[in-house]
């Protein structure tokens, strides 16, 4: 059996080892006490940083959705322009989310698009309105003379309002987070 400088689990520690262990424990307790307030501050700053990431993410998402809405309207207008058909439609129902119409195509079929008509602003029930539709897909229909440019005002004002709210809120959150949206990099100490 070889002798070891470390005590076995069954044997009581000798006085030198016990003194080293208690000195290490005291040093750990002192460093934890000193790091306590700093770690609380770091935790608070981390929460503020997470909040700023959430606000930034939501603002970017809303802005992206505004872009997608305008781009989608442009694509729909382009598809209608490729295979344009015209007709006179009657407005069947006007709700907050869509305006339903009924129109007849030259082949005698009656169409009532489930998603309604594009750019329905100002239409009322029972009104007759000239429409343009895609002859290959008659459910894609818009009010004649109206284009995707009409989507620019609502989407741009939505994006502008979003950033008017998110900008000051981000500034406040970043100020509380110590001016950083990313955490400080921790340097790992290597064993000597």
Image: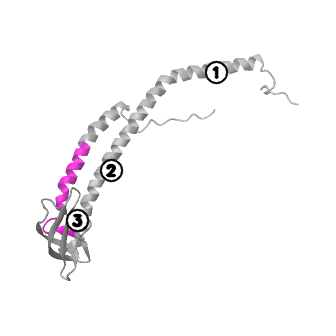
Mark 1 vs 3, N-terminal side:
1
Q: Check disc 2: other Cα within 10 Å, few if <14, some if 14-19, many if 20+.
A: few
Q: Is residue 2 left or right of residue 162?
A: right
Q: Position of residue 188 (x, y in %)?
A: 55, 35
Q: CA distance from mark 2 to mark 3?
A: 26 Å
Q: Which of these two is toward me, 164 or 106?
A: 106
Q: Which of these two is toward me, 137 or 76?
A: 137
Q: Is residue 20 above or below residue 168?
A: above
Q: Is residue 82 above or below residue 155?
A: below
What residue is at 25 percent from the left and 40 percent from the top?
165
Mark 1 vs 2, N-terminal side:
1
Residue for badge 1:
25
Q: Check disc 1: other Cα within 10 Å, few if <14, some if 14-19, many if 20+.
A: few
The kind of secondary structure element at disc 3 is: loop
Q: CA distance from mark 1 to mark 3?
A: 74 Å
Mark 2 vs 3, N-terminal side:
2
The kind of secondary structure element at disc 1 is: helix
Q: Which disc is residue 115 wearing?
A: none
Q: Is residue 143 magenta?
A: yes
The mark closer to the camera, 1 or 2, is 2
Q: Is residue 64 above or below residue 148?
A: above
Residue for badge 2:
61
Q: Position of residue 31 (x, y in %)?
A: 56, 22
Q: Which of these two is toward me, 181 or 46?
A: 46
Q: Is residue 145 magenta?
A: yes
Task: Identify the magenta region.
Answer: 141-163
Q: Is residue 151 left or right of residue 174?
A: left
Residue for badge 3:
116
Cβ–Cβ under 8 Å for marks 1 and 3:
no
Q: How would you classify the magenta stretch by its main secondary structure?
A: helix
Q: Position of residue 181 (x, y in %)?
A: 38, 38
């Amino acid at each position: 059996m070889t002798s070891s400088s470390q005590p076995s689990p069954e044997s009581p520690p000798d006085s030198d080892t016990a003194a080293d262990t208690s000195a290490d424990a005291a040093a750990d307790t002192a460093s934890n006490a000193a790091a306590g307030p700093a770690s609380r501050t770091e935790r608070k700053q981390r929460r503020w940083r997470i909040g700023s990431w959430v606000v930034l993410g939501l603002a970017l998402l809303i802005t992206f959705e505004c872009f997608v809405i305008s781009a989608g309207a442009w694509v729909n207008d382009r598809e209608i322009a490729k295979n344009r058909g015209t007709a006179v439609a009657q407005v069947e129902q006007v709700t907050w989310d869509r305006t339903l119409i009924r129109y007849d195509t030259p082949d005698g079929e009656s169409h009532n698009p489930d998603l309604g008509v594009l750019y329905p602003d100002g239409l009322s029930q029972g009104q007759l309105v000239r429409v343009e539709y895609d002859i290959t897909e008659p459910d894609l229909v818009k009010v004649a003379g109206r284009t995707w440019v009409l989507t620019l005002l609502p989407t741009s004002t939505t994006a502008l309002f979003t950033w008017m709210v998110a900008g000051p809120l981000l500034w406040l959150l970043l100020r509380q987070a110590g001016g950083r949206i990313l955490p400080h990099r921790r340097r790992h100490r290597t064993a000597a």
